[in-house]
């Protein structure tokens, strides 16, 4: 029994010594994580618009230089390194197509002060033809540039008879209303002009010119944006060019009337 008690005491003493040694051992030093420095991004200064510039607006200080990642500088961007005097160079230039606030400036979207705005926005193969309008013949003044319209011609029948109304051109883009290019930045509608300039093909220009000679009234009918076909196409009254008529005269019970075929 004495031997068993002596062995238990030795075992307890050994365990106590082992625990004491672990408690007195110094704590391991913390491992410090090494953070790699962020890569340096090469920057250029790019010319941008300080506000939204609508088509037809004249520049007068609405540009500034903005730092831009060099890798993201696209073709056509204007950098300070290549054209340091660009802000002064573009003064009085005309905006050819809308430039959003903060968008980099491209020379292709601007026109020199001595360049013609209308001829520059007119697509190749198209003609700009003007027609007189009034508030009651232009959808109450709600027709604006880049809208699409149908052109309606109204004439009187034989001997001043019934009115004959016909759509002579369809799906026609409006280029301008008088000298106004589009609504202003605050969304206010422009005043109703007296002349609308339309984008036509050469054949449509001839039809429009012929119609203006014989029409008592020309009306523009605004098309819904869902009915617009920007690729063109639509009914054209080509009979106006060969001298034939698209109307039929009906005599009934001594009464003469004219209707479209």
Image (tube, grey):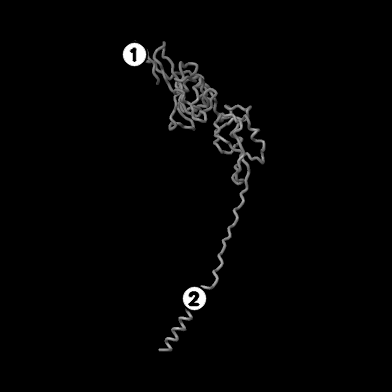
Relative to residue 125, is residue 10 depicted above or below?
below
Left or right: residue 111 versus residue 17 is right
Estimate the x, y position of residue 97 in percent, counting from the top left: 55, 32
Relative to residue 119, is residue 37 depicted above or below?
below
Q: Which residue is mark 1?
A: 252
**Could you tell me which residue is drawn at 55 percent across and 36 percent down?**
101
Other-residue count near label 2 (Cα within 10 Å), few / some / many at <14 / 14–19 / ≥20: few
State the SS at label 2: helix
Q: Out of 65 and 9, give the one closest to the viewer.
A: 9
Estimate the x, y position of residue 260 in percent, counting from the top left: 40, 20
Quarter residue 30 falls in: bottom right
**Could you tell me which residue is drawn at 46 percent across and 17 percent down?**
217
Q: Out of 59 and 146, give the one closest to the viewer.
A: 59
Estimate the x, y position of residue 156 in percent, counting from the top left: 42, 14
Mark before the other along the chain sequence, 2 or 1? 2
Per the rendering, the mark at residue 19 is 2
Quarter residue 103 falls in: top right
- Whether tag 2 and tag 1 are in contact, CB under 8 A, the answer is no
Other-residue count near label 1 (Cα within 10 Å), few / some / many at <14 / 14–19 / ≥20: few
On the rendered image, what quadrant is the N terminus found in? bottom left
Relative to residue 38, is residue 188 depicted above or below?
above
Mark 2, mark 1: which one is toward the viewer? 2
């Amino acid at each position: 029994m004495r031997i068993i008690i002596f062995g238990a005491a030795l075992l307890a003493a050994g365990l106590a010594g082992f625990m004491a040694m672990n408690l007195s051992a110094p704590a391991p030093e913390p491992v410090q994580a090494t953070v790699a420095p962020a890569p340096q991004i090469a920057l250029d200064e790019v010319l941008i618009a300080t506000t939204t510039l609508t088509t037809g607006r004249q520049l007068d200080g609405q540009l500034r230089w903005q730092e831009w990642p060099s890798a993201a500088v696209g073709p056509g961007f204007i950098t300070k390194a290549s054209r340091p005097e660009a802000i002064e160079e573009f003064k009085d230039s005309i905006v050819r197509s809308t430039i959003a606030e903060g968008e980099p400036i491209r020379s292709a979207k601007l026109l020199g002060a001595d360049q013609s705005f209308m001829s520059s926005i007119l697509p190749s193969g198209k003609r700009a033809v003007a027609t007189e309008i009034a508030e009651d013949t232009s959808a109450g003044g709600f027709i604006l540039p880049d809208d699409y319209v149908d052109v309606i011609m109204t004439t009187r029948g034989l001997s001043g008879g019934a009115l004959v109304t016909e759509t002579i051109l369809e799906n026609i883009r409006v280029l301008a209303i008088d000298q106004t290019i589009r609504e202003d930045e605050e969304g206010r509608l422009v005043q109703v002009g007296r002349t609308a300039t339309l984008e036509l093909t050469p054949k449509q220009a001839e039809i429009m010119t012929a119609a203006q000679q014989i029409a008592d009234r020309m009306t523009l009918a605004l098309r819904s944006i869902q009915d617009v076909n920007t690729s063109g196409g639509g009914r054209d009254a080509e009979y106006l060019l060969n001298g034939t008529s698209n109307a039929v005269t009906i005599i009934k019970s001594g009464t003469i009337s004219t209707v479209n075929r």
